[in-house]
Amino acid sequence: MVDFSLTDEQREVRDWVRTFVRKEILPLEPEVLRRERTGRPGLEPSELRELQLKAKESGFWGVLTPEEYGGMNLGGVMAALLEAELGRSFVPFRFGGSADNILFFANEEQKETYLKPTIAGDRKSCFAITEPGAGSDARAIRTSARQDGDDWIINGEKTFITGGNEADFTMVFAVTDKEKGANGGVTCFLVDRDAGWKSHPIDTMGEWGPAALTFDNVRVPARNILGEVGRGFELAMRWIGQGRYLLPARAIGSCERLLEMGIDYARTRETFGQPIAERQAIQWMIADSAVEIEALRWLVLHAAWQVDQGMDSRQAQSMAKLYGGIKANEIVDRVLQIHGGMGYTRELPVERWYRELRLLRIYEGTDEIQRRTIARNLLKGHASVSGTLG
């Protein structure tokens, strides 16, 4: 028998987050929209911190962080359920108490300097591998690091770095052996901002504020190498593959909320003496969206389940990421269409979600990269069209 029900613990945790979103986050939406319309951040760092600490009072801290570091270590399925609940609001909230997964590969000295302060919220990091000429093809990075005594000198440029404007240290990937390249010639360095790297904001169509980072003869001590010299590309792939399913998981909540808005508007908006909910064109938009949300939910949960089982979940995560990005964009487009001219205004959050969800098809692996991964796994026999049922 296949059991699709949640455990009592999963339901209890999910319901707490659902209540937290309803009571603490949704009321902030009008002010967040107002601020963003004037070019200001939706949440100030101090406000995000206050919300995170409020959640911490109830034990919600470090959802995926190991218990030995004060986290909850809830696992993949639970994390996906929580992301879906948080996705029901566009307010940029995330639980505190987490750190990039590759920081757990730090040595003891580095853990005291970087990992633990990041988990505590006292430091902010950013992951820097993407370059102007190396996006989907991370193997093409050109940022270099040459050894000078006990130090390394880094030169190069990174782009579209999430959190790069706020971070006080970066995990930057640089070529240390051109001959080997990604096959043993890329190293990861932990570099404090006061070492001399600069960041510059990149203006985008959404509220995501990435940065361009520049390294001009930035000197880094050898003790700041994360992992081993030449083994950085392996760490980068661990970071990139840590949780692609969590991005479409958050989109589930966004799509649920958007469809609810579309249904409510269709019930009350009248044309030619009838609510538009009576129009077949609108009904089909609603029906298609509901089916796609349900399909996305199971793709995400299946990928998360594979993560919890310790299985190779790359195929399932790529499928969830690809389907989620495409369908989330189709759903928000339908909901905007249902709202007509009002959906196009900045008075409602529909157009805001329209811009935000567009990013889902680009970052952490474009649609094209996901298709490439899925097809190659099938063509090489690493995956079957029969899926987990064989």
Image (tube, grey):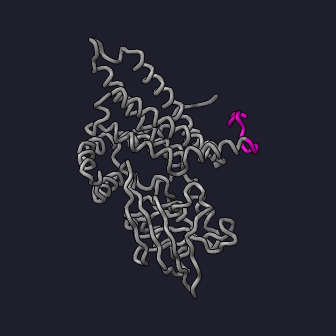
Q: Is residue 74 left or right of residue 54?
A: right
Residue at 50 percent across and 30 percent down: it is: 292
**Number of numbered callouts drawn:** 0
Most distant residue in the bottom direction: 149
Q: Nearer the viewer, residue 207 or 390?
A: 207
Residue 117 x %, y %: 42, 68
* Quarter of the view holding residue 387: top right
Residue at 50 percent across and 67 percent down: it is: 171
Q: Is residue 207 left or right of residue 137?
A: left
Q: Can you say whether 371 is above or below 135 in the image?
A: above
Q: Can you say whether 59 is above or below 324 in the image?
A: below
Q: Which residues are magenta?
A: 379-390
Q: Is residue 389 magenta?
A: yes
Residue at 43 percent across and 64 percent down: it is: 212
Most distant residue in the front direction: 133
Q: The N terminus is located in which quarter? A: top right
Residue at 55 percent across and 50 percent down: it is: 365
Q: Can you say whether 247 is above or below 386 in the image?
A: below
Residue 247 x %, y %: 49, 46
Assign the magenta stretch its main secondary structure: loop
Q: Is residue 48 left or right of residue 163?
A: left
Q: The C terminus is located in which quarter? A: top right
Q: Nearer the viewer, residue 367 or 50?
A: 367
Q: Nearer the viewer, residue 381 or 253?
A: 381
Residue 166 x %, y %: 37, 64
Q: Is residue 386 magenta?
A: yes
